[in-house]
Every structure is written in C-alpha cells, then in structure tokens.
Amino acid sequence: MIKTKKKVILIIAKKNLTNIPKKTLKIYMNLALILFMIGVLGFILNRKNIILLIISIEIMLLAVTLLILISSYSFQDSIGQTFGIYIISIAGAESVIGLSILVAYYRLRGNISLRT
C-alpha cells in the first residue's frame, strides 16, 4: 500500500515539473537568441582584440547550450542535457587552448595586438 502511494506522488510531481508555460519557453529562447547575436556582433565588429574574440565565441557557445537545454526540457528528452555538458566542456577546452596560445604569443612578441 505504501509503495503505490509513493509511485502516485512521484508521477504527480513529474507531471508538475514538465508543465512549463509556452510563454516562459519563448522568453528563454529569445534570451538565447539575443546572447547569440551579441556574440556574433562582438566577433564581427571587433577584429583587433583576440581576448574579446574568444569571449564572443564563448558567448555564442553558451547561447547554443542554453537553447539545447531549453529544447530538451520542453521535449522531455535527457539527451539534450548530455549535449549541453559536452558543449560546455568543449567551450572550456577551447578557451584554455586559446589563452595558452595567447600567452605563448605574448612571450614571443611582447604584445597581443592583431594590428600588423
């Protein structure tokens, strides 16, 4: 008798978690789109500072991750969360490699300006 009550409570809790209003999903999707556009504009408009280019790429990757997580949550699919963790780890590795290249370039040249 106790086991069935626990199952019923778990089913009710699961149904309440997955009922997200469409308005909330639209807000988060618009936020992801705005973040991605900020990253694209930062990448296009700023061609002289390498650090800002890396930050713009990171913003774009995080916007895509947010969109994937929102989609996986709304479609009740856990694969999107796995992809989100994968994208975050790739973004972290990319920033570490980029910054290490910048440090090596700074040691070689003495500045990190892209002006020739």
Image: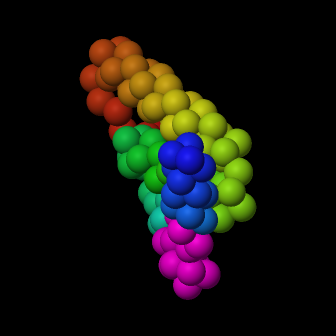
**Colour style of the rendered protein structure:** rainbow
Determine if residue 83 is in view: yes
Relative to 25, does residue 93 appear above or below in the rendering? above
- Judging depth in this view, the residue of 62 and 55 nearest the camera is 62
Residue at image location 53% in from the left, 53% down from the top: 5
By secondary structure, the bulk of the magenta-drawn segment is best described as helix
State the image coordinates of residue 4 (x, y, percent, origin top left). Answer: 59, 49
- Judging depth in this view, the residue of 94 and 16 nearest the camera is 16
Relative to 72, does residue 53 appear above or below in the rendering? above
State the image coordinates of residue 3 (x, y, percent, origin top left). Answer: 56, 43
State the image coordinates of residue 107 (x, y, percent, origin top left). Answer: 30, 15
Determine if residue 47 is in view: no
- Drawn side of residue 104 relative to residue 45, left or right: left
- Drawn side of residue 100 relative to residue 84, left or right: left
Q: Is residue 66 magenta?
A: no
Residue at image location 66% in from the left, 45% down from the top: 78
Relative to 66, does residue 81 appear above or below in the rendering? above
Q: Quadrant of residue 22?
A: bottom right
Residue at image location 50% in from the left, 26% down from the top: 93
Which residues fall within the magenta stretch? 16-31
State the image coordinates of residue 91 (x, y, percent, origin top left). Answer: 52, 36
Q: Quadrant of residue 74?
A: bottom right
- Drawn side of residue 26 relative to residue 51, left or right: right
Q: Residue furthest bottom?
A: 23
